[in-house]
Image (tube, helix red, strand yellow):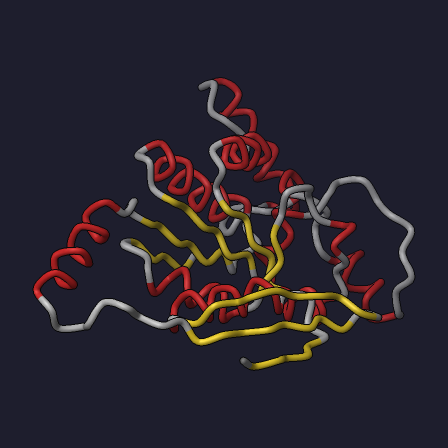
Amino acid sequence: MLEVHITDKGAKANLTAWSNSTGNELLKYEEDNNVLKFWIKKKVNRLKKHTLLGNLRRRRDYMSEKKRTTIVLFSGDYDKAMAAYIIANGAAAYDHEVTIFHTFWGLNALRKEEPLTLNKGFLEKMFAKMMPRGADKMGLSKMNFAGMGPKMIKQVMKKHNAMTLPQLIEMAQEQEVKLIACTMTMDLLGLHQEELLNGVEYAGVAAYLAEAGNGNVNLFI
């Protein structure tokens, strides 16, 4: 049994994903003064790898698994985030297990619109002011026109009864799409968990790679 001590906020998701993908077992974890303690045990595979019965069972398990779609949302553009969430909702409607990993500017899609009073340094405050607060404040990748572009496209969307980005995010949560915020990027940009939407999960790149490794569709937007 291995005992691991980590201070990273996303360690639980990362170690859980790592344990599942490497055949280990995460027995338990505790939090003590902002230090996460994990106990990991190597799983014993009672089924020999090359037996016919083992192959048949693995084939049965593979066929019974749901298809999985993973999306990395790197962009902070309204239209690209919309594309990511349209694909995610479509995949969820087809009964896929869907994960959207938000990193760098894609984290803005998860920000709450209301300002919060938090203890931040100078650079963190500057980033917070320069970045859009929430999905509805994000700009377009093309024809932004100093903020006029998003207003125009929202009018067109309203005319055609198309869903807005905040509505697509809400639908994704209703369909149990897993929304993950990259903890490393949150630290770099000075974002706190209190600033992000309820229901968001927090993890690092290891958790995403575990999801992508089992994915049938992997996209980077």
The foreground one among 154 and 215 is 215
- Residue at 68% x, 77% y is 6
Residue 29, quarter of the rendered image: bottom right
* In the displayed structure image, the side of residue 126 where residue 19 appears, left or right: left
Query: Which residue reaches farthest front?
Result: 46
Residue 165 image point, x, y percent: 55, 36
- Residue at 56% x, 62% y is 13
* In the displayed structure image, the side of residue 89 where residue 59 appears, left or right: left
Q: Which corner quadrant holds the N terminus?
A: bottom right
The foreground one among 45 and 35 is 45
Against 199, residue 47 (above or below) is below
Q: Is there any visible trace of residue 40 in the rendered image? A: yes
Against 5, residue 21 (above or below) is above
Q: Is there any visible trace of residue 152 in the rendered image? A: no
The foreground one among 142 and 77 is 77
* In the displayed structure image, the side of residue 212 where residue 166 appears, left or right: right
Against 128, residue 84 (above or below) is above
- Residue at 27% x, 47% y is 65
Residue 32 image point, x, y percent: 80, 69
Against 150, residue 200 (above or below) is below
Residue 203 image point, x, y percent: 59, 63
The foreground one among 198 and 44 is 44
Residue 38 image point, x, y percent: 63, 72
